[in-house]
Image (spheres, rainbow, N blue to C red):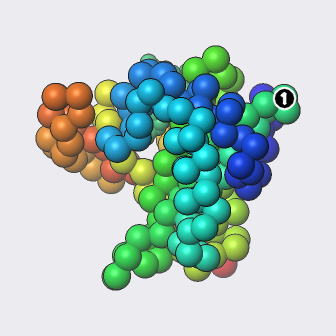
Amino acid sequence: MACELREWKIEDSGALSLLMNNPNIQNNLRDGIPYPYTKADAEDFIRSTLSAAPDSLFAFAIFSEGRLCGSISVMRQNNIHRRTGELGYYIAEEFWGRGIATEAVGKICRYVFENTDLVRIFAEPFSYNKASCRVLEKNAFQLEGLLRSNAEKNGKILDMKLYSLIKEQP
Ligand SMILES: CC(C)(COP(=O)(O)OP(=O)(O)OC[C@H]1O[C@@H](n2cnc3c(N)ncnc32)[C@H](O)[C@@H]1OP(=O)(O)O)[C@@H](O)C(=O)NCCC(=O)NCCS
């Protein structure tokens, strides 16, 4: 299914709050995201995204069939990691299994490599998150390793997997 990436607009806050009020999504993300997730929380997120320092955050709303169905971003890292970006994404549960995350990851990686000086994009899914690992593998991300006991989420110590995609040299 085709999807498009576009800049966030404050009007997306209602739809974003609906899709983020879902533990099946939040259980696979980092902590610090409000739950329940109100429209005001969504507005705060969108405002912070739009006011991020230029060239530090490449963040997009994902649309399919004219509806907001997810979020995807690459965040530039600091210091000696300044030419590396961390990839994060989620898709509304009703849209799972339609290839949307796979397509969105491909699109944002192409965008970042063509429009910024980043040379490496990485992602760190929980190792049990087979769907996310598959999305990365389908986009030619390479598994660099298992990060053992790398996180505590919902009271459990979890392994994570480190995947990366390197910009091809011309
Ligand atoms: C992970 C997530 C983004 C996937 O989105 P999606 O749009 O459903 O992904 P796609 O449809 O593009 O691809 C999913 C792939 O995983 C596979 N998959 C799904 N569940 C699976 C499972 N339990 N075991 C193995 N493979 C699985 C699908 O079959 C598909 O692969 P295929 O095309 O080879 O058949 C979505 O489930 C989500 O938002 N989850 C919660 C948040 C999250 O995990 N974000 C990523 C954090 S690193």
**Farthest front residue?**
40
Q: Amino acid at mark 1?
A: Glu
Q: x%, y% of residue 164?
A: 44, 56
Residue at (66, 40) in percent of width and height: 13
Crowding around mark 1 (Cα neighbors within 10 Å: few <14, some 14 to 19, many 20+) is: few
For the residue pair 31 and 73, the one nearer the viewer reads as 31
Q: x%, y% of residue 91?
A: 59, 32
**Farthest right residue?**
66
Task: Please identify the quadrant where the N terminus is shown.
Answer: top right
Q: Is residue 113 above or below residue 132?
A: below
How many marks on residues?
A: 1
**Farthest top residue?**
94
Residue at (56, 68) in percent of width and height: 52
Residue located beneath label 1 in the image: 65
Task: Please identify the quadrant where the C terminus is shown.
Answer: bottom right
Residue at (79, 31) in percent of width and height: 67
Q: x%, y% of residue 152?
A: 18, 38
